[in-house]
Amino acid sequence: MESLIIYWNVSPEIVGIGPLHIRWYGLLFALGFLLAYLLEQRMFRFEGLPQDWLDSAILYVFAGTLLGARLGHVFFYAWDYYSQHPLDILKVWQGGLASHGALIGIVLALWVFSKRVSKLPLLWVLDRAVVSIALAAVFIRTGNLMNSEIFGLPTSLPWGFVFVRVDGVAGPARHPTQIYEALAYLLTFVTLVWLFFKTDARKRPGLLLGVFLFMVFSARFAIEFLKENQAEFESGMVLNMGQLLSIPLILAGIWLIWRALRRAVVNWGSRG
């Protein structure tokens, strides 16, 4: 098979003017949230929900994502460093976000939203949020690719990437695990959109959330075998931190799917 190896040497910065620096990661992060917002608008119209709920929800989710992802990285992967340099926790622009932490932050943020705004069960809120979260995750992993981070182990497969900024032009071809994950999240997104608009899944509390957890974190668990370790303490571990954190989420997804399919459809009336 003809080699398709790509020499990846994209600058993470799009443009810098004085103190202003626009980076690919930040742009893709924002674009992911914008498209997620537009999708949720359509979903809200489909169910006849008030627009002001969405405006509040997107603020809660944005704050929960950023705070949870940062603190997840700090506590799950780099506590030894940040415990000695606590002010560096605020330096988000230097990198360091964890998807498991983002999920925790989003759940907590939407729990507050469900109590203060929608007055509906948390599962109802999460079932609708995960559709757009899956879409946003595609853009976030693409941002990781632009940063030449969270890459894979060396590979002899023909589509390997040489991450020049990390390994140099003579470096090994590696698994582009950012692309693997982005494709897995895209598949999850397409599945959730179909379930939401074409089936009664939105009326089965926990079903969409369960599918999201199972698909996203099963993919994450498998792809971690192809990744470089994200922290030094993972060396020698049979399963790395990302996999250990994924296992309970996969099991939770299976349980939620089983539970939702065993229970009767819930008719939410004019609100979905």
Image: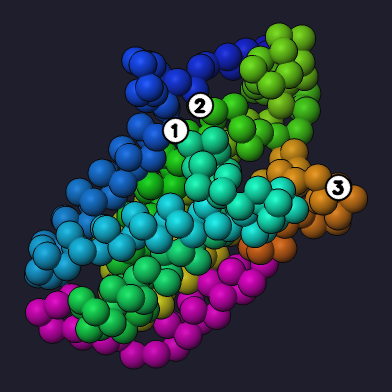
Residue lying at 43% horizontally and 70% vertically, measured from the top left: 107
Q: Is residue 192 visible?
A: no
| Mark 1 or 3, nearer chain start | 1
In magenta, the rendered stretch is 247-272
Question: Looking at the image, do the residues carrying marks 1 and 2 touch, with CB atoms under 8 Å apart?
Answer: yes
Q: Position of residue 173 (x, y in %)?
A: 73, 21
Q: Residue at x 75, y 38 (%)?
A: 228
Q: Which residue is mark 3?
A: 235
User: Is 249 or 268 nearer to us in this picture?
Assistant: 249
From the top left corner, tell me how far across and down residue 233 is, in percent. 82, 51
Given the image, on which type of amino acid does mark 3 rest? Ser
Report which residue position mark 2 lands on: 146
Locate the N terminus and report the quarter of the image it occupies. top right
Q: Is residue 272 above or below residue 70?
A: below
| The C terminus - image quarter | bottom left
Give the residue at the far top of this rendering.
Answer: 169
Residue indicated by mark 1: 25
Mark 1–mark 3 Cα distance, whole angstroms, equals 28 Å
